[in-house]
Image (spheres, rainbow, N blue to C red):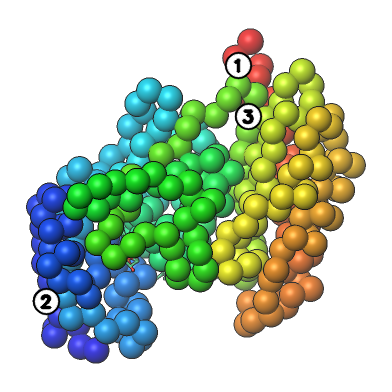
Amino acid sequence: MNLSEIRLHTPQTLNEALELSVKIKEACFLAGGTDLLVDIKQGLLAAKDIISLQEIKELKGIKKKNKEIRLGALVTPNDILSDSLINRYIPALADAARSMASTQIRAVATIGGNISSAVPSADLPPPLIAAEASVKLQGLESSRKVSLSEFFRGPRETACKTGELLTFILIPLLPPGTGISYLKFTLREANALAVASVASRVTLKDGKINRAAIVLGAVAPTPIMALRASEFLINREPSQSTFEKAALLAKEEGEPISDIRGSIWYRKELISVLTRRTLSEALERAQRKNRKEK
Ligand SMILES: Cc1cc2nc3c(=O)[nH]c(=O)nc-3n(C[C@H](O)[C@H](O)[C@H](O)COP(=O)(O)OP(=O)(O)OC[C@H]3O[C@@H](n4cnc5c(N)ncnc54)[C@H](O)[C@@H]3O)c2cc1C
């Protein structure tokens, strides 16, 4: 489809955007356009009407309110990696943003688009799921909060319904003694999607692991929690041998496919290596936080 044939709507407020999406049911939302415009150009999507979100000020900014950090859907990877709140409370999200694409893409892509595209290799969902983040979905008449771990339904399929817009990402402040780490493996340094990625979270209490989460990216139709591996860690003292065993369990929980970027065998090996490394870094961050809080 030729881009010049598309009607571009530029609402100034959230309400105007929602009204337009009710009026023009087949219209697509556009945030940074780094996924949407590629899909249109490649003929994967035929959109006659596009509703640009770019002018909507309500969807910008990162704020701490009560016991959570709230990111507007239009926040870019560059906003995330340079934000002091994110670097203080959830540096793993800044690491994930830094690992994305290239400087140019990081300046225009958005967190709302990264989540809404529901591409299994997307970088921001794994650390967000490890942090128990949720998203706010706003319709014209009502809104609802959905846990990010339940938002993804399949590749490019989400819980967001027609007429709803993802407005905010809500991250609860992590309990004391918590560390999260995110690592991805790519075939080259820039503009490369993850072959496999892992976000691990560890919460320490009285020298033992009190809570844990291992989230796998790019190795299943959606980001998935490695439940058996995460549960294995609970009530254990953190050690390299414990992390090795958890990594072997996580490897069995991935459901990768073989494609141009890597085989099933290779991706499973990556899960194991990345799980071990992210658990070690999450532990270091948790211990550092514990020392600061004392
Ligand atoms: C060269 C290149 C390299 C890339 N590298 C990476 C990478 O390393 N890691 C990575 O994770 N991604 C990567 N991407 C993919 C892309 O940049 C990201 O997924 C980006 O965050 C998408 O955000 P966007 O604002 O551009 O989304 P858009 O393209 O504007 O939108 C994407 C989809 O989400 C919908 N949408 C957008 N915002 C909302 C909203 N608020 N509510 C409801 N629906 C919405 C749109 O309708 C569309 O269907 C790359 C893309 C390119 C072109």
On the question of residue 210 being in view, the answer is yes
Question: Disc 2 marks which residue?
Answer: 7
The quadrant of the picture showing ligand 1 is bottom left
Which amino acid does the dot numbered 1 rest on? Answer: Lys
Residue visible at 69% across and 38% down in the picture: 212
Categorize mark 2 by other alpha carbons within 10 Å: few (<14), some (14-19), many (20+). few
**Under tag 2, what secondary structure?**
strand
Question: Disc 3 marks which residue?
Answer: 178
Q: What whole-number distance in Å separates the C-alpha atoms at marks 3 and 1?
A: 12 Å
**Residue 37 vs residue 189: left or right?**
left
The response on whether ligand 1 sits within 8 Å of label 1 is no
Residue visible at 63% across and 29% down in the picture: 178
- Residue 271: image location, x then y, percent: 73, 59
Looking at the picture, tell me which residue is in the foreground, 251 or 188: 251
Q: What whole-number distance in Å separates the C-alpha atoms at marks 2 and 1?
A: 54 Å
Extreme right residue here? 241
Residue 109 lies in quadrant: bottom left
Give the vertical position of 235 relative to 184 (above or below).
above
Q: What whole-number distance in Å separates the C-alpha atoms at marks 3 and 2?
A: 47 Å
**Residue 234 vs residue 91: left or right?**
right
Extreme front residue here? 141
Q: In this figure, what is the number of numbered marks? A: 3
The mark lying in front, picked from 2 and 1, is 2
Looking at the picture, tell me which residue is in the foreground, 106 or 172: 172
Marker disc for residue 292: 1
Categorize mark 3 by other alpha carbons within 10 Å: few (<14), some (14-19), many (20+). many
- Residue 202: image location, x then y, percent: 68, 35
